[in-house]
Image (cartoon, rainbow, N blue to C red):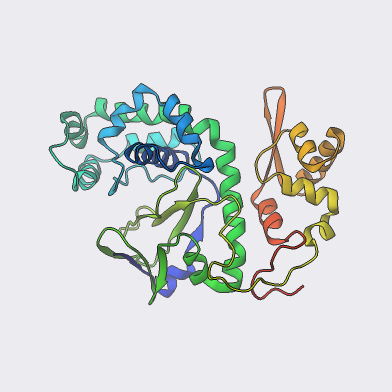
Amino acid sequence: MVRVNFTPDDVARTRFTVTPAPLPDTVLAFIELRRAANAGWRGIGPAGQWLHQARRDFPVTARPLLDLLGPRGPWPDLFDTLTPHLEEGLEELRATPRATLRLELGYGWGDRNGKPPLWTRNLADGDREELELVVRALHDLHAAVVAPRWESSVAAVHADVAGRIPLLVSGGHEALLNSLHPKLRWRDGGLERAGLDFEHDLGGQGLLLRPSLFWAGEPVFSIHPDGLRPNILAYSAQRGGPPAARNGAAADPVVPDSLAALLGPTRAAVLRALREPLGTTELAAAAGISAASASEHAKVLREASLIETRRRGRMVAHSLTALGAIMASRLPAPGLPLAPGDSP
């Protein structure tokens, strides 16, 4: 049983990160590929179809990671940098002290059979050429597998966080933490998950909750009691937030379209259509309006900081900001249940 103990200060300092981190997401994508391969590529549903494409796109230069990251943990924490820029994360990796390399690589190899390959032993000794091999592997894997899906990743993270905020409001941190995965449970002032046998205190730092589109496994703890890095819980991002009422409870009351009442029905439809990034033509089709109308509504929503627009060559892509994702999730459409404690 994995158990992480919280003090009142830890509860107060537990929060989300709403910006995906490219280096740890690249590592999670690699491990997810290994997990799928280990399972014989069975059971990959529509949400995991990207794995088949990633398998085809996998660069040969990323093969050294096979010696560092197995399909099952524990995994080294060398890659837990939260910078939103890949190159900055790789520079942090290059600057890893030799003592940290040795400790983390030894920990990561601890439960694996056999002797580590010579090159990983050299890496643990601080060999710069071997470290550059790892940097190139991560850089090329990110370019081939993660970068093409980055905008979808950002949108998924925003949608996941927005979908969980009502749980935090209505049920507090206990309801929020219980929603992250069926095997993750709050009990007696701590968070528990079946798995490796360890128990840690958070040391007053709290826990950083990090959803990732590239991870479908059980939540992964990365605990740093020395305070040099934040304590992290990485979990699988759900585009629509957590599933509603799990225990066969009666349906909650339903409400009129609050978002449409606030923004108008067409603009509300445009905002809801952007749960994934869309071009103007795609947005128009999704909302059932003309391209010119979609462009005008997007302009108003952008000025209100509810969406952002990025250029892709001669095309543009519209996506929700964190505020827009919160509004789209928190103000339900007709027939959707209210969160506990709400009133029509």
| Residue 245 in the figure: left or right of residue 303 | left
Q: Name the residue: 40% across, 42% down.
A: 28
In which quadrant is the C terminus drawn? bottom right
Closest to the observer: 161 or 113? 113
Residue 97 vs 117, above or below: the answer is below
Image quarter hosting the N terminus: bottom left
Q: Is residue 185 above or below residue 18?
A: below
Task: Using the rendered image of the protein, determine whether residue 187 is visible from the camera's viewpoint.
Answer: yes
Q: Residue at x 30, y 39 (%)?
A: 69
> Can residue 305 be seen in this snapshot?
no
- Could you tell whether 3 is left or right of 241 in the image? left
| 52 relative to 131 in the view: left or right | right
Question: In the figure, residue 280 lies in which quadrant?
Answer: top right
Q: Position of residue 225 (x, y in %)?
A: 31, 60
Residue pictured at 19% horizontal, 48% vertical:
111
Locate residue 23: give its quadrant.
Answer: top left
Which residue: 55% across, 36% down?
150
Choose between 32 and 200: the one closer to the eye. Answer: 32
The x and y percentages for residue 70 are 28, 40
Question: Is residue 300 found left or right of 207 in the rendered image?
Answer: right
Indicate the position of residue 15 as horizontal and vertical percent values: 50, 61
